[in-house]
Structures are given as structure tokens and as C-alpha cells.
């Protein structure tokens, strides 16, 4: 186990003592203790929560070794000075590390260093009272083997229950810059309001009402104002799996030739049209009391964690969901407006009602007006959308695996490109899936005709036939409005996320570079996952530091403390490194020319090389049914059923380890035997190695408590696979040969004539080990992402005009 | 979705009304209602918990359709008579079924029948008040789409919170024969005691103290006596993964020849020896208050469910675990005694202390003396062990996937046979893994020399070299003591459990046949899993009915209501069928003779057929690394790397569907070229079909609430795979050719001489579809279970003397 803590603050002794006083570790007895060892014993007593009597405390102490021979109870009785080896030998035990496995009793400090746990340093071997206090403070903020701070471990065992009764005026409570769980999660208030938006997406002549579920600490009833963590999730009132499946498109259809045109961006640019909106409802009264509650919300574990710490959680599914008005539109401006409406209500500038009919208004009187948005995938997407409106009150978003332009989710360079794992999905499929009003027949039957018509319209507008970027997609490109962003942003993305591909975050990151907001990015080795239950990084602490600062204004230096870029290494487990930047545009690129089956540094004139895209029907069917087999055989250099259907080139073995950082660009001169075609590229790391498993391993199911007798998450970590593999795909890209210039413009494509195309692969950050080879595979049909027409298409690549440019980090 | 409810009781109207009165559905307003529709509205009002005002209730009613055109709010206003179509159209919506997907609005009753939901029947179309009350009662006990009763769905939304305040004397509360969640799970008492056992397994001259964690309802402090659900889990204070891995045996070792002997069972039979035990501790005082508490126990979700219903949960890890004395012994009599000690304390006949040193005694004064044991695998094993002692107070055990004889777990017919998925595991490995005292260095260093010596002894005694049944294994055969069992037993086992193989439950079931206790068995299509979160069977309700009867003495007819045998079908999902018996010894068997690659009804003299066990090193390495590939190629009839290393025979296609019920026996005449050898057999269902996935699919992660704002489980179900497969292994068996007579006796084995062996395959229950073929694969080395010596062994099978006997159910 290797610990990586980015959110732990160094603190001077005075502050440490004062903070320990607020959480009752430093009290009168400790203040009166006359030396280090007495102080140590008093602190331990407070930490041994299970022992409810002093006699049992002594017994429990005897379970720990202070020296290799003497247990802690006996050692404390000797009243000898505390030393670093004593303190950290016990600390390792308190932090749940295991002898032999994690540390050797004879040298605890070596283990502290190896596990990357912070150690208190002082000149004198024999610790004074102050030394013990300073070291104890540090210990409280140090992670256990189970991925949370020692103080959080104590919290999970009930440490903070005595502070539940603190008056509202003394809450929230911060320690080491982070909010602590002094709110009783089993005494939360759950209520529903209906926010009146500024859209009428179902054209019923009434402004869409939007249901919002609120969970807030009981203390808000006593005057405490709290910030809100708002998660906008179209999924969270239910999903129409079956209807979505029925809507899914057949991908075994041919690619078709597109008519040449000279469309410019201006021709297709989206402009908001003035709409006459229905009148606002007439307020019939005002109240501070809601009329509706709920049992169990569809929650995000990160929000659950904060519910114990003085934050409210607000969930809204938006237009087109159960108990709300409107229809699903998959990322439209109307959806953004409906997302923002909740923030405006929380921030005081919009009305909400207690139910859907009586027009009794209610304010978010319990909210301090500061809002953060959280969530992954579509949820993070809507957070991104909201941020690009610059709405007041939205102080920050934590957008995880978020889409920043829907064209980058469902299309690429003039091609239909499915999110990995979901061939045939498209904007209309997602709209149907999330249109949860469908689940309530009494409501659905009224809206069905309108929604069906909307879906028909969407299918035309999204234009699956051409795959081009058009007005529909331009409306759904949030990056157009990056300049409006006022919220600080934390972005989290998987470098192996082929669902929401990394371009979505890279272009947002790039667009934010010169904007006067604070931006942070964390890139992990996962696919489309959450990382808040990882053992090796203190992600939850980082977000606590961040939100304590952003929403409560705590002066904890969060913006400086958290690195701008944190990236998980792809070679060594549990290694997270801080960087200054990612995918810097100025990074020089190394060029590799195509040369038969090699990638070479200087062009070698080898003429052209051809491959066919068509497969025998049986082979085609096998790949269509088993995408994993296709992927494996595509990248295997040995002869197999795909050998003649792709070019596979490898560089020489690398002498040194190199890091690919950012956007790899492939430049290819290609001819095809028909007036249509596409090219796909995969950049590959070739070399026998034990690589990370695709998904994190559960280390401890339900083992990560989010509070005291509260909800639980499963602790996870990326582990190396038990067997070596020969290669791993690093990144990929696709292009329609008729969209060489722009995704909105159809180019001419004459059969058998060579054209030059330039394709930016998805951005990456990948350590290529010495001895490995960099590979490039050039092919056409991508069984997991493109249409699969199995057409008689023959591609030729002119080798001496083709190359790949790779940005290596120094 | 198909619903299978076995625990729903039919109830007369008077009882129904009286029971609805206890849970506040029938109150003065309902009593005064003058007709069916008014009654219906009042009942709905109580069920719509989210609406905290009448005005919002009306709005929520409008979300439901009463007729295909009229919503429920409008329909109720019409004050027309309730009819079956109205009631069940709304019921399907209340039960979370989906229009189109699950039902058609025009014919709700057809859907009720198809989903197998119970329907209230009456002569008159227009329902009276009594009809509505009776139908409502039935609805409350009917399962929703999410695998719990409608009443449980209401409970999860807070229905019972108003009854938390009921006086202790009015609790527990039963409805439809089952305990209801009227206890606040967020107000439970957690405490620890140390039970003094009658063993001194660490030979320290003191009786082993055993830590027990107790969770009991607060109401016990006010005089309520509750029964205990006791889970004995050696895992539950932690597991030494790394030390266990280090202990794991190398399985790439040769099979060795055993010296001929004439050992009889009497020679190796285990007899308990008289031991002089240390004196009991001298009691220094008595108390009713404990000295220790705990945060989060390692819980079983079934216990969690009952904690809201008036049951205590008790967890103990037993000898050799954190905070207890003793060493791990993997199933010894001492472990059984330590398991039983907790029951004796709960039942009042044994002492416990408040801590490990002060000898202050404490009684289980809050317990009504009735105990059930729960848990799966090792946990169920110890429940089985405890039951075979006949200990007082143990009213019933629910043993899931339990071992009934450790020889059937780690050995078979004179061979080392690993639990599936864990090659190299053995009794000593499990002992090391579960010896959690190792995690507390201060404690561990004292006991280490003794434990190491014990492990050395165990390694000799378990005798991995011969694989024979001996005194060590006889001590660990709980079935020897079946006759002592006084507890009623519920057994649950997976028909595809190759970890704890089905023989363990079948021989227990068989041994119980004539014993005067009630026994029930549930067989599912899973491997080594829990089934209490399955959607299609009301397992949790069944256990509630059972435990309400067994532990609270509720006269609910549980013993008659629950079928003796329930078996999940292997062809059609969500199909559970009640049977009278399983694996009846009297069932006639059909014989299939070996005939080259066929299984035939009459012997066909074909001489002998041979196969070699040895593989090229590369092939061997591949199979050793990828057990799944080995398994696949072993059973694939097409030529592959294993074709010459096994015999594969298939019957003709079956004309009709047949059920194999119980023990298949293979009889083979075999010769081998060395004085040692083994045979393995797999019975196979050949035929293209979509079969169940190996593991259940999560339908709703964290979607199964175990109470109101309490712990959660993930709803699961077995689904058909998306693709067809050509075969599926039904059952398997193994034998050492030197153990033809007995597992404790070594027979002579002359090279190249034919011997007859008879092997009972693991018992099964398998529906073989018409058109499918029954297959038998004969081989030697089992890469997943046996040693893998890759020796030059040539086997010959005399076909005309070899056959397989298959018991088919009528």
C-alpha cells in the first residue's frame, strides 16, 4: 500500500492545539498533563472508543506493542519518554497496518517512509508534551490502511457523537481545514419543492415545474445556513431500460457517400431564438414548510459523506422526469436552463412551490446561497453545462467523466462513434431512457404524443446518416460558452474512459487555461468510474478541503494546497503524481513515419500498403457478437483473421521510459476504392507486462463508512493483473474520409485517389516503459464504435506520406 | 419478472382486519367508512407517505391511472364502486411494475396472473367495503417488482416509524405471521462480552475466553426479552490474506503411489479423549452492564433485516481470533465447543465476563433463550456443527452453503480435491487465514510458537500426501453426530457450488430424513452465494415466517406453510418449484454404457479406449494459468489440445425433457501404466441454449433496503446469458485408483491391469431439455481441483464394463 495525501495541511502547534480543543482531544486533563507520556496516554484514552471503562482501556492497550517486546499498557506504566520509534510503531498498529505484511516491528520509521505516511520530526529523541501533541495532530490527519484519515476512522466509531448536541451556532466544525462529521445523519430533514423554471419544454403553455429533493441538517431549523451540494441527474427518478433498448439503432448498416458541399460553420452555428414564454404562476401564498418528503433518494456517496459535515444535498432530475414537467432533450439549452433553475432557487433569485398545483411559494431559507455541483457522466455534464452559464451562486463544480460537447460523445470527424460499450446508442436513445415520466402512466399518456413528435424531430436533427456536426450538435457544445464560466472547477476523468472520451475533458481544460477561475484536474487509470472510494488517494479529503473553502469560505489555502494536475501512473499501482499541466499545446512532438510494419524516425520510401475492410460473414458475426475478441485480434501482431484488414506498425524498442502527454496526431495519405470511407487508428503500447486490471478491485466491500452508522461505500483500488499481457491500447481516433477539413463540411472523395487526412487521437497521458514498442494500428470499421456495413472497401495508405506525431513529456 | 412467494399466508377477513388494526391501517376512520371506495381512499391515504398534506395527496393520486383514461384522483372523486380491474390496475402501479414492459392497461388481471401475483377473488364485480379490506390486506403481503412485499416497501418509506414509540410490552408486532420493523435500527445497543468456554485450545492453562458482539433493540432495557440470531464467523474479526497466500500449497506436484494397507474405519475412527481442563475462573462480581462497545460489526444482511423486527444479532469469531483466546483448528471438536459456548451463555447455562481480566460476570438477561444460527459457508458450517451437539436453546439453524464434513471440502475418494477456485488451499491454509490474533502483534507474539507448532502438527495430520480419510478428517465429519440434532434445519445450497460441493448438503439432508426434526431445503442455480437479495423468491419472508415461529413461538404454521424442498429451475429464469423430496434413494436409475464417443442404453462391445494424461509443457502452463480455458476445451467435442487426453461420450438427443435428480454414479473398468492413478468425471448437458449466467446480475445496486434509513443490499437475479453456449457441466467426481473400496484404505494397483471403480458424482438436480444430449467426459488431472503432476500416465477404459447410472425424476 502506498499513501498519497494531497489535502493534509501542515499546521503550527498553536493552531493544532486550538483545533484539537474544538474536537475535545485537548481538554483540561491534557492541558494539565506534565509530560509527554502522560499526554500520550490521555490522548490514547480518547481514541479507544470501544472501551467504556478504564479497566477495559488498559486491556485494550495491551493488544498493541510499544517496543518489539513490551506491550503498550506495560510500556505506559514505565512512564518513559515517548520516542519516534515508539510513537510510530503504535501508530502503524492504530492505522491498521499489518506486521510483516506492511511493517517490521524493529523499524517502524522505515515503513512510514515506504508507505508514504507523514512523520513528525523534531531534534530531540525524547519527546516533550508539545512533540506528542504535534505528532498526535499529524496522526489524526494521516490515512489508515483503509483509505481514510485516522480521525475519520475514529468518527466512524462514534468519536463525534458527543458533538452532535453542539448548538447550531457552533457548527460546522473544521479540523485541518476540512469540515468534520458533527451532524447526525440519522436526523436529517428530507423535503421536496417544485422549482418554476424559465422553459416550457413540453409546450403546454405553462413554465416547467421541476421537482427537487432536499436533504439538510436538522440544525438548519435552528438558524444554521448551509451550502448545497447539488446533483442534477436525469437518471435519478428512474430509467426506462426497455424503451431505451427498443430505441437503440442498428449499427450493421453501410457507411454512405455524402454529397459534396461547402457548408461553413456560420451556416450551422446555433443561435438561441427568442421564445415567448408562458407567464409565471401567480403566487397564492408563502410558507417555510414543505408538503412532501421522500424515503431513499438515489444518492452519490460523495454527497452522503458531506451530509454529516454541514452540507445539504439537493437532487433534481430536471425536465422530462417523474413529478417534473417537460421532456428530455439530451443536452439542449432548455435542459441547461432547467439545471440552472435549481441553483437560482437555492441562491434566492427564483421561485419554488410546495406542490405542483397550489402555487404556495417557498424559499431556500436554510441555504447560505453557495452551491457546488457534483456527479459523474451525465451528472457531471450538466454541472459543466450549468457552469458555462455563469449562474450566480454556483461557486464550483466537481465534474467527473463529464461530456463537454455531445458531438464528442456520439460522433467524431463526420462519423457516428458510439460511446464504448454501447453501439447503437444516440441522443434519442438517451432521451427515451431518461424520460422517466414514462413510468407514471397517468402522466405519460398526456405527454406521449408531444414527446413522440419531439423524438422524431430529434432523430432528424441529430442526423445519424451523415454523422456531421450541425446546429443540433452546436447547441449541445458547452465549450462555446467556456468564457462565461465564473465557477472554479475540479475535473476528474479516466484516461481509459471510452464512454465519455478524454477529449471532453481535455478541450475543457484547454479552454479554461486563460480564464480567471481556479481549475484542477485529476486523471486516473480507470474507465467510466468514480474514484471517491480509492485507497491510495485522499480524493474525499481533497474535495472536503475544496468545498470547505469554496462554500464555507474557510481560509484553508485549498487553491494552493491542491495540485493543478494529479495523474495516476499507469505502471506502478497506487502512484499519483502532481504536475503543472497536462496536454500543453507547446510540447514538442516526435514524428514516426509509416514503413511497412515499422514506425521509423526518418521517412523510408516504401510505396503504398493496402488492406480490405470486408470480412467473411462468419468472421463478421463472431466479431459483432464478441467485441473483446475483435479488439484482441485487431492488436495482435500474430497472424489471425484480421491480419489482412489492418496495418500494424511498431517502433523500435524504447531505450528509456517515456511519457506520452496530450494529443497524438496521425497524418495519413489514403485512397479508397469507392467514393466513401473511414479510417480508424489505435496507438498501442507493445511489450510483455503485468498491467492494471481494467476495473478497480474491491478491497473491502461496504468497508468504507461515510459516517457513524451511516451509508457505506466499497473500498477499491487498481491492482496489477495476475498475468502478463502483450499490449495495451493507449488511445484511438476515427475520421470519415469525406470530412477531412471540418466535421460540418463534406469533401470530395474520388475512388482510388490519394487524400491526406490528419486525425487528432483522444488525448492521453501514458508511461511507455523502456523495452516496449510504440505501435499504430490503422483500420476502418471499429466494431465497438462505428457502423459496421461490412462493405467491399479497399484502403491504400501511401507510407512515405504518412506519419504519427507523438508529444513526449521531458 | 415472475413472482414466487412461499411465505404469504391466506387469512380470513376477521384476522386481516384485526392485523391491519395493529399496524394502523384499520382505524376509526376506516371503521366508519360507509362503502368500498371511501375505504379504498382512506387506505391509499395511509400508503402515500411522501405526501405530508392532503392537497399533495390528491396531486400524487393523479399520477396513477384507475382506468386507461381516468386518473386515480378523478376516479375516486366519481365515488364509483371499486372493481377488480380498477384495484389491480392501480396495484400494479403501486407495486412498481411498468406499463408496456410488465402490463397492459386494458388487462391488469392478465398481468397479475402472468407475474404470478396473488389476486383477491369474489363473486360480485362491485366490491364491498369488506372486499376492499380483504384485497388491501392481500396487497400488503404481495411482492413488488423489487422483491419485497408492498408493506416492506411502505416500511422502507417510514410507515412503521410511528410505532417505534410503542411500549416494549406491545412489541414485537407480527403481521401475516411475520415480525414487522417496529424497532428503530438507529437506536440499537451494541455491546461486547467475553464468554468462558470449556476448551483451552492454546494450552495456556486457562479456559479460552471468547469475544461476542451483541446488537439488541433498545426495548430490551425496558423488559422485552428477544431471541438471538447468532452468526459464528471465524472471518469476522479480520482475515490474514497474505499469510494464507504464503501457506497455500503447490499443486504442480506428482501424484504418488500409496503403500497397500488394510486399514479399517475402526482403525482411524476419532474418539474424544478425556482432557483435564483448567479450572473455571473465580467470579469476582456480577453486573448487568458491559464495558465495551463497537462501531460496525461484520454483518450478514439477513441479520440486519431482523434487527428492525425484534431480534438481537450476536456475532462471534471463536477461538483463535482477535480479542479471543485459543488457536484456529479448522473444524475441530474444540471449535465446535467454542461455537456452542456462545449459545449456552445466551441460553443461561454458561458464564460470560465484561472484560478479559476482571472476572465480572454478566448474564444474557435480555435474551428469551431462543437462538437461531445463520450464515453461509464456514458460518453455516459452524451452525451445522453446533446443531449436531444438540445444545439447548438452539431452536433452528439456517445453514447456507455449509460444509457437513471437511473431508468433502478438501478431499475426495483418496485425493486432494481443492474447493473450486482455490487450488492449493487446505485445512492449514484456512486456519492461518482465520487466525486473526495474528493481526494484533502484542497478542500474536505470545502465541506464535504454540500456533506454529500446531500448524506443523495439522499439516501432518491432514496428510496431503495420501489424500486419505483419517482420524483428523473423522473428527471433522459432523455427520457422525446427526442423530444428536434437536434443532429444526433450513438448508440452502447452490447446485453449482464447486466451493462447498453439494454432497455436503445432500448427505446431511439424507441423514436427517428419519430424524424427528423439521427440515427444509432450498437449492438454487448459483455457486457459493447468498440468495437473500433475489427478486424472484421471497426468501427473506420465508425466513421471517420461520424465525417468528421458531424463536417467538408464533402460531403461523410455518412448518406446514414452507415447502420441504424448493428448487430453482435451471432453464427458465425466476422459476422456483416446491417438491416433496430431493435425491430420494429409491429413485430408479437409467444406465448408459460407454461406447467410443457415445453413451448407449445397451452394452456394445468395443474393447478398450485409452488416453494419456501428460501434456506438452506449453499447453500445461497455459491451462495452469487459465483454468477457464482448460474447462472449456475439456468439454468441447471439437478437436483441440485436450482431445487425446480424455474420453468424451454423448447420448442420443433426448426426446423429452428429463430431470436428473440426485446422485449419478459412474462405474468404470480402468487400467493405468503405473502403480498410481486417478480418474475424474464430468457429466455434461450438451445442446445449444441460452443458459443462466454463472453469477446473478445486480438489478438494483443498494436498491434493497433492509429497513427505514438502515442498511441496504443489492437486488439480484439470475439472468440468461446474451449468447448461446454449446454445453454446461452438470456435475463431477474424482477418485484415486488406490481407494476403490474406501477413502481410508489403500488398494493394490498393478500397472496395466484392469480394475473396477465406482464413483458417486456430486448430487444434482438438472433439467435436460428435449433435443439435448447427456455427455460424460472421463479424464484424470483436474486443473482446478487435483494435483497437477503432468506425469506420464496412460489410462485405458474397458468400454463394455463401464457405464453411468442416472436417476431421472418421473
Image (cartoon, coloured by chain):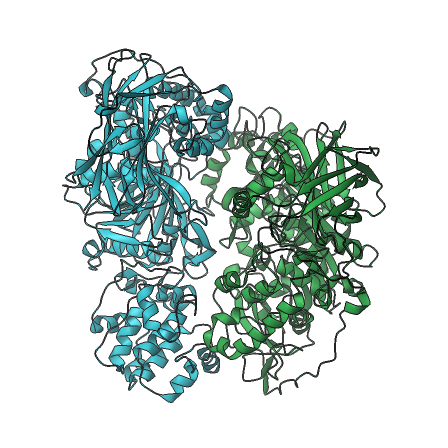
Chain colours: A cyan, B green
Is B349 on the left or on the right of B283, as rendered? right
Picture quadrant where residue B648 is located: top right
Residue B269 visible? The answer is no
Residue B770: x and y in percent read 73, 28
Q: How many marks?
A: 0
Picture quadrant where residue B139 is located: top right
Q: Nearer the viewer, residue A265 or B590?
A: B590
Residue B699: x and y in percent read 53, 41
Residue A439: x and y in percent read 49, 32
Residue B188 visible? The answer is yes
Taking A104 as reference, is B310 above or below it?
above
Q: Nearer the viewer, residue A604 or A530?
A: A604
Q: Quadrant of the N terminus of chain A?
A: bottom left
Taking A344 as reference, is A310 above or below it?
below
Is A248 on the left or on the right of B422, as rendered? left
Taking B77 as reference, is A747 above or below it?
above
Amino acid at each position: 500500500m502506498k499513501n498519497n495525501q494531497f489535502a493534509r495541511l501542515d499546521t503550527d502547534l498553536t493552531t493544532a492545539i486550538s483545533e484539537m480543543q474544538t474536537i475535545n482531544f485537548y481538554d483540561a486533563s491534557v492541558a494539565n498533563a506534565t509530560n509527554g507520556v502522560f499526554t500520550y496516554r490521555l490522548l490514547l484514552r480518547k481514541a479507544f472508543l470501544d472501551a467504556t471503562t478504564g479497566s477495559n482501556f488498559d486491556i485494550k492497550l495491551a493488544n498493541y506493542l510499544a517496543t518489539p517486546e513490551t506491550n503498550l499498557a506495560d510500556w505506559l506504566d514505565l512512564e518513559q519518554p515517548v520516542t519516534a520509534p515508539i510513537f510510530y510503531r503504535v501508530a502503524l498498529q492504530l492505522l491498521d497496518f499489518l506486521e510483516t505484511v506492511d511493517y517490521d516491528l524493529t523499524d517502524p520509521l522505515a515503513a512510514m517512509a515506504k508507505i508514504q505516511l507523514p512523520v513528525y520530526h523534531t531534534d530531540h529523541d525524547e519527546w516533550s508534551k508539545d512533540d506528542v501533541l504535534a505528532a498526535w495532530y499529524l496522526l489524526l490527519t494521516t490515512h489508515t490502511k483503509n483509505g481514510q484519515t485516522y480521525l475519520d476512522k475514529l468518527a466512524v466509531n462514534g468519536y463525534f457523537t458527543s458533538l452532535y448536541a453542539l448548538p447550531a451556532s457552533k457548527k460546522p466544525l473544521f479540523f485541518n481545514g476540512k469540515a468534520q462529521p458533527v451532524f447526525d445523519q440519522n436526523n436529517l430533514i428530507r423535503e421536496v419543492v417544485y422549482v418554476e423554471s424559465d422553459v416550457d419544454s413540453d409546450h403546454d403553455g405553462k413554465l416547467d415545474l421541476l421537482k427537487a429533493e432536499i436533504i439538510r441538517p436538522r440544525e438548519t431549523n435552528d438558524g444554521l445556513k448551509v451550502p448545497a451540494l447539488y446533483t442534477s441527474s436525469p437518471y435519478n427518478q428512474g430509467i426506462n431500460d426497455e424503451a431505451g433498448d427498443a430505441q437503440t439503432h442498428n449499427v450493421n448498416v453501410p457507411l454512405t457517400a455524402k454529397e459534396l458541399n461547402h457548408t461553413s460553420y456560420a451556416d450551422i452555428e446555433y443561435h438561441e431564438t427568442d421564445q415567448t414564454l408562458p407567464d409565471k404562476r401567480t403566487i397564492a401564498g408563502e410558507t417555510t414548510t414543505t408538503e412532501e418528503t421522500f424515503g431513499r433518494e438515489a444518492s452519490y456517496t460523495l454527497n452522503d459523506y458531506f451530509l454529516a459535515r454541514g452540507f445539504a444535498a439537493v437532487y433534481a432530475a430536471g425536465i422530462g422526469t417523474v413529478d417534473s414537467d417537460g421532456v428530455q432533450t439530451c443536452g439542449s439549452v432548455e435542459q441547461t436552463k432547467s439545471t440552472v433553475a435549481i441553483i437560482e432557487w437555492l441562491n434566492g433569485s427564483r421561485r419554488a412551490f410546495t406542490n405542483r398545483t397550489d402555487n404556495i411559494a417557498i424559499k431556500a431559507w436554510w441555504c447560505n446561497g453557495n452551491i457546488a455541483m457534483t456527479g459523474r457522466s451525465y451528472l457531471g455534464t450538466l454541472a459543466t453545462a450549468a457552469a458555462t452559464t455563469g449562474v450566480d451562486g454556483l461557486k464550483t463544480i466537481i465534474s467527473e467523466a463529464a461530456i463537454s460537447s455531445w458531438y464528442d460523445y456520439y460522433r467524431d470527424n463526420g462519423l457516428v462513434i458510439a460511446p464504448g460499450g454501447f453501439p447503437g446508442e444516440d441522443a434519442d436513445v438517451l432521451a427515451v431512457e431518461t424520460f422517466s415520466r414514462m413510468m407514471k402512466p397517468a402522466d405519460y399518456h398526456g405527454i406521449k404524443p408531444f414527446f413522440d413528435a419531439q423524438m422524431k424531430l430529434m432523430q432528424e436533427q441529430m442526423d445519424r446518416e451523415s454523422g456531421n456536426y450541425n446546429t443540433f450538435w452546436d447547441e449541445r457544445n458547452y465549450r462555446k460558452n467556456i468564457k462565461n464560466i465564473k465557477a472554479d472547477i475540479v475535473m476528474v476523468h479516466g484516461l481509459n474512459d471510452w464512454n465519455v472520451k478524454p477529449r471532453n475533458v481535455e478541450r475543457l481544460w484547454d479552454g479554461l487555461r486563460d480564464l480567471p477561475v481556479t481549475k484542477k484536474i485529476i486523471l486516473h487509470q480507470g474507465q467510466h468510474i468514480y474514484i471517491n472510494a480509492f485507497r491510495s488517494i485522499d480524493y474525499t479529503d481533497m474535495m472536503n478541503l475544496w468545498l470547505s473553502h469554496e462554500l464555507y469560505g474557510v481560509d484553508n489555502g485549498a487553491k494552493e494546497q491542491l495540485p493543478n494536475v494529479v495523474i495516476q501512473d499507469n505502471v506502478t499501482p497506487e502512484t499519483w503524481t502532481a504536475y503543472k499541466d497536462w496536454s500543453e499545446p507547446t510540447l514538442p512532438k516526435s514524428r514516426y513515419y509509416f514503413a511497412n510494419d515499422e514506425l521509423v524516425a526518418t521517412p523510408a520510401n516504401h510505396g503504398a500498403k493496402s488492406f480490405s475492410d470486408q470480412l467473411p460473414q462468419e468472421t463478421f458475426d463472431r466479431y459483432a457478437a464478441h467485441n473483446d475478441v475483435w479488439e484482441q485480434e485487431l492488436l495482435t501482431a500474430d497472424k489471425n483473421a484480421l491480419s489482412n484488414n489492418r496495418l500494424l506498425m511498431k517502433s523500435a524498442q524504447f531505450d528509456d521510459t517515456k511519457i506520452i502527454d496530450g494529443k497524438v496526431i496521425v497524418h495519413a495519405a489514403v485512397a479508397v476504392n469507392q467514393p466513401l470511407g473511414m479510417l480508424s487508428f489505435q496507438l498501442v503500447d507493445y511489450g510483455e507486462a503485468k498491467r492494471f486490471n481494467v476495473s478497480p478491485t474491491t478491497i473491502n466491500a461496504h468497508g468504507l463508512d461515510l459516517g457513524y452508522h451511516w451509508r457505506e461505500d466499497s473500498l477499491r483500488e487498481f491492482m496489477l493483473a495476475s498475468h502478463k499481457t502483450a499490449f495495451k491500447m493507449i488511445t484511438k481516433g476515427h475520421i470519415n474520409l469525406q470530412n477531412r477539413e471540418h466535421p460540418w463540411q463534406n469533401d470530395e472523395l474520388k475512388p482510388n485517389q490519394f487524400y491526406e487526412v490528419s486525425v487528432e487521437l483522444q488525448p492521453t497521458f501514458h508511461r511507455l516503459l523502456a523495452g516496449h514498442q510504440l505501435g499504430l494500428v490503422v483500420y476502418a470499421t471499429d466494431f465497438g464504435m462505428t457502423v459496421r456495413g461490412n462493405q467491399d472497401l479497399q484502403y491504400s495508405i501511401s507510407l512515405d506520406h504518412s506519419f504519427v506525431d507523438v508529444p513526449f513529456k521531458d
